[in-house]
């Protein structure tokens, strides 16, 4: 089968909560039986995103600080003025990071570095149950 | 493996002009007859990009402000000193946001959230007619 | 053949060293014999990324400055405090830019603008030999 889909849930706490989801992505590739192709990893919703990082507490904390500088929690957001959600910063952060990434795989393995993990980043201002979508296309 | 291509034009005003293009992307998926796969949405050119956001005026305005902080219009850009284009800020903003995104679709539907729209962001310093490219791969 | 893979090496100097890799990507598409589809261009490792920009010295220098503002070299990084690598800024920059991009191709040509190049950006704090992965899926 040339395409393969895998969905899974992640419980998050919001406020730039960062979860290592590499195992789920690698597992989907193995389960698909595909050797070579493209994996898209995306999170539906406008207050979360996906990227890669060396998943150790230092780098994770550094990324959170950099994102907080990009779009501080207290920023006088027009989204909050209109809707009262209080998560204007979450929307801006998610739009800047992007909703998903695409990575190649080969020989049934994701072509990432040894110290590079795929991470879900939840920017919302409350706990969420997120669904992550992995879509593979290849042969 | 089946592929499907759809191009369309968007008239923009530049200066981080943000357009909801979700309808065109969803329409391409329906028109393709494909059920499941990957959609790449990209804009040719080095002064525009694509991301997703909740497309309501507050969040859109908040994103514009955050991007203006990232790379202000008046920044003493080397690109402007060399070429006189006056759009050095546009190039930097576009390179940071990225030229396109990839999203999964399934059952003929884009796997985005209910309040999440695909948007073209034009960073140039003048009105442009942009061509957006949607490329689907799937089955 | 519905998928095609091409890997190549780039010698970098680190510190946001930016290399034009468009020729390698276009060459891979021609070599594949594929007409239409999706190209994913990614760099394994957690201190480098891929984007597009008009590859002229002004815009390249402007991008480097904007990235230095996003995550300055001297930032009191927790990653450095734990591991002593001194490249905490590299990890943050790479996570924000993203590990790779996806672009459509058609008629055997990458659908990028005339003044838009695909670039590898190495954020590490030392020279590296990077492997870039180009993965094509199409028909």
Image (cartoon, coloured by chain):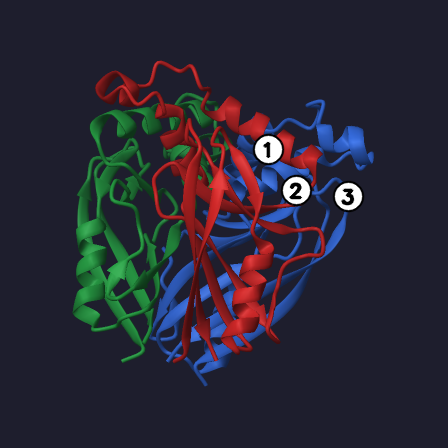
Chain colours: A blue, B red, C green
Q: Nearer the viewer, residue C87 or B120?
A: B120
Residue ID for mark 1:
B63
Same-chain check, marks 1 and 3: no
Q: Secondary structure at mark 2?
A: loop
Residue lying at the far right of the rendered structure: A84
Check the picture and name the quadrant holding the C terminus of chain A.
bottom left
Q: Pointer 2 indicates a residue of which chain?
A: A
Find disc 2 in the rendering and name its residue.
A123
Same subunit, tags 2 and 1: no
Q: Which label sits on residue A126?
A: 3
In the displayed structure, C70 sits above or below A128; it is above
Report the residue at 67% width, 33% height from top: A89
Q: Quadrant of residue C139?
A: bottom left
Is label 3 in a helix, a strand or a loop? loop
Q: Which residue is more in the foreground, A110 or B9?
A: B9
Question: Residue at horizontal 77%, vertical 43%?
Answer: A126
**In the picture provided, is A14 more to the left or to the right than C76?**
right
Chain of the residue on which disc 1 is drawn = B
User: Cβ–Cβ below 8 Å for labels 2 and 1?
Assistant: no
Q: Quadrant of residue C124?
A: top left
User: Circle 3: is it few (<14), some (14-19), or many (20+) Cα within 10 Å?
Assistant: few
Q: Position of residue B127 (x, y in %)?
A: 44, 32
Residue at 54% over, 69% down: B29
Q: Nearer the viewer, mark 2 or mark 1?
A: 1
Cα gap from disc 2 to disc 3, whole angstroms: 9 Å
Distance, label 2 to label 1, CA atoms, is 14 Å
Depicted A118 relative to depicted A34: above or below: above
At x 23%, y 64%, the residue is C29
Per the rendering, the mark at residue B30 is: none
């Amino acid at each position: 089968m040339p395409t393969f889909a895998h969905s899974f849930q992640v419980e998050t706490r919001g406020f730039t909560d960062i979860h290592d989801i590499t195992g789920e992505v690698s597992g989907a590739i193995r389960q698909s039986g595909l050797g070579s192709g493209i994996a898209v990893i995306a999170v539906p919703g406008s207050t979360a995103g996906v990227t890669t990082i060396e998943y150790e507490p230092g780098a994770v904390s550094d990324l959170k600080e950099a994102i907080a500088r990009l779009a501080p929690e207290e920023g006088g957001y027009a989204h909050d003025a209109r809707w009262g959600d209080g998560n204007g910063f979450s929307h801006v952060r998610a739009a800047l990071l992007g909703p998903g990434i695409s990575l190649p795989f080969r020989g049934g393995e994701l072509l990432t570095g040894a110290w590079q993990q795929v991470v879900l980043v939840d920017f919302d201002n409350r706990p969420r149950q997120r669904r992550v979508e992995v879509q593979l296309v290849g042969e």
